[in-house]
Image (spheres, rainbow, N blue to C red):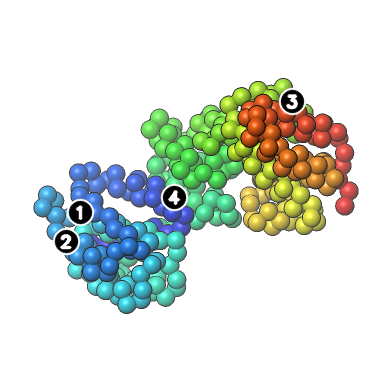
Amino acid sequence: MSLTVLLGDESICARQLQHLLRFYDGVTVERLDAADSTIIDIVACVLSQSLFSPAHIVVIDHLDNLTRANLDILIDAVSDSTNHIYAIAKALTVEQRKLFTNGLGEMFIVRDYPALDGKRAHETVEIIASTSDVSLTRQARQLLIERAGHEPARLQSVIEQCRIGGIRNPSAAQINVLCGTTSATGVPWDLSDHLESGDLHSALDLCAAAVPLATLAYLGNRYQQAMRVIEFGASSPEEAAKAIDGKSIFTAERLLALSRRVGRERLAEIITIIAEGDLLAKQHGIDGLRIVVCRLAPLFSEQRTFSG
């Protein structure tokens, strides 16, 4: 019938495949991994007949592991198959795409799901949302990327909650509520905001539900990125985005403002305190994390401006 290839981040593709397969309720699904299966096994599965329905679903993982010769064999099999074929791959080369296009024509369908940490993050979130019939404003997309973009499964879970709850056009406030104050890995994302605004009381309150080492890793990464902005000599959000490997302009703008306000010397102190805090967190858990937070707080309360 057709070959639909899902390209990009593996966890995103896997979740999107689940969405696609929900339209085939009651249909048999067979799944193979091209990294572990022979081409004979794959072809046999592609051409197999279902005892219970006219056609069934075949899913091939790691399609990009197949050699040129095996791709030719697969294309012939798909052309003769009456089944719905899906495949997942990180990427396809220009030559591989040409092979599929020439061999299958309109039966070859590609769905791209770029990683969530690059310039195409908004595009990926829009694709995921539209699959669930959810429409996001740019503000809501940006918030979702900021709060859950590093955890594709969690991001998709938030969108799925919108779909199930009938929230077709969620506001930024609703997205914020669905994201929660803590990630699935136990990191309170608002902790850095409270620290940087001088609200030590709220920062300490958030520590109660935190996983100490994961939270320190998050803080360390944030302030190392701010230091990279300084070292890069960034003077605009666009330059700051380059310094932190193409993160969103929104994130880059915040880190640029932070680096200017805190400065190189205090950022170096902050990064050192966080690094040394690992031992405190291992020995004393949440209390150790609170000690680190208390040590960090004065470094954000002084209003200095970065100069060069």
User: Could you say which is closer to the camera, residue 159 or residue 69?
Assistant: 69
Q: Give the Cα distance between marks 2 and 3.
A: 64 Å
Residue shown at 77%/34% (left/top)?
296
| Vertical comparison of 20 with 203: above or below | below
Tell me whether circle 2 and circle 1 mark residues in contact (CB < 8 Å).
Answer: yes
The amino acid on which the numbered mark 1 sits, given as a three-letter code, is: His
* Image mark for residue 56: 1
**Dot 4 lies on which element?**
helix
Mark 3 highlights which residue?
Answer: 200
Mark 2 highlights which residue?
Answer: 48
Residue shown at 59%/42% (left/top)?
146
Q: Position of residue 298 (x, y in %)?
A: 82, 31
4 or 3: mark nearer the eye:
3
Q: Give the Cα distance between marks 1 and 3.
A: 58 Å
* Mark earlier in primary sequence (2, 3): 2
Can you name the residue that lies furthest to the left here?
A: 51
* Mark earlier in primary sequence (1, 4): 4
